[in-house]
Amino acid sequence: MCLAIPAKIVSINENDMAAVDIMGVVRHVSLGLVPEAHAGDHVLVHAGFAIQVVDEEYATETLQMLKDLDILEAEV
């Protein structure tokens, strides 16, 4: 099963790589597929790539659903 996890962009470096926060865990992902993304935006992350910019409400609701289903702890 493939799963994209919402994350908040903390910072972006010159190589289109971003530090993202996923429930307090910082990961580094590529922004190559979402060049419009900026620090502070929420994105869906899959396999080391941000694949879509989403709004904060969507990100929060999705994370809560994943927690409720006990999916997120196993993935993160």
Image (spheres, rainbow, N blue to C red):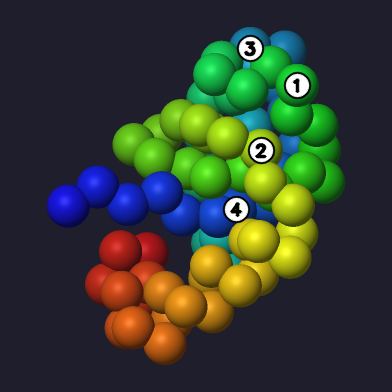
Vertically, is 50 above or below 6? above
Query: Which residue has dot 3 on it?
Result: 15
Secondary structure of the residue carrying tag 2 is strand
- Residue 25 is situated, as x and y percent measured from the top left of the image, at 54, 62
Secondary structure of the residue carrying tag 3 is loop
Nearer-N-terminus badge (3/1): 3
Mark 4, Cα crowd under 10 Å, few <14 / some 14-19 / many 20+, is: many
Query: Which residue has dot 2 on it?
Result: 53
- Spatial CA distance of label 2 from label 3 is 18 Å
Mark 3, Cα crowd under 10 Å, few <14 / some 14-19 / many 20+, is: few
Secondary structure of the residue carrying tag 4 is strand
Nearer-N-terminus badge (4/1): 4
In this orientation, does residue 10 appear?
A: no
Q: Which residue is drawn at 42% across and 87% down?
A: 68
Q: Residue at x 66, y 38 (%)?
A: 53
**Numbered badge on residue 36:** 1
Give the amino acid at mark 3.
Asn
Quarter location, residue 67: bottom left
Q: Residue at x 54, y 19 (%)?
A: 33
Mark 1, Cα crowd under 10 Å, few <14 / some 14-19 / many 20+, is: few
Quarter location, residue 32: top right
Query: Which residue has dot 4 on it?
Result: 7
- Spatial CA distance of label 4 from label 3 is 19 Å
Quarter location, residue 12: top right
Q: Are marks 4 and 1 in contact (CB under 8 Å)?
A: no
* Along the line of sight, the residue nearer the viewer: 63 or 18: 63
- Spatial CA distance of label 2 from label 4 is 10 Å
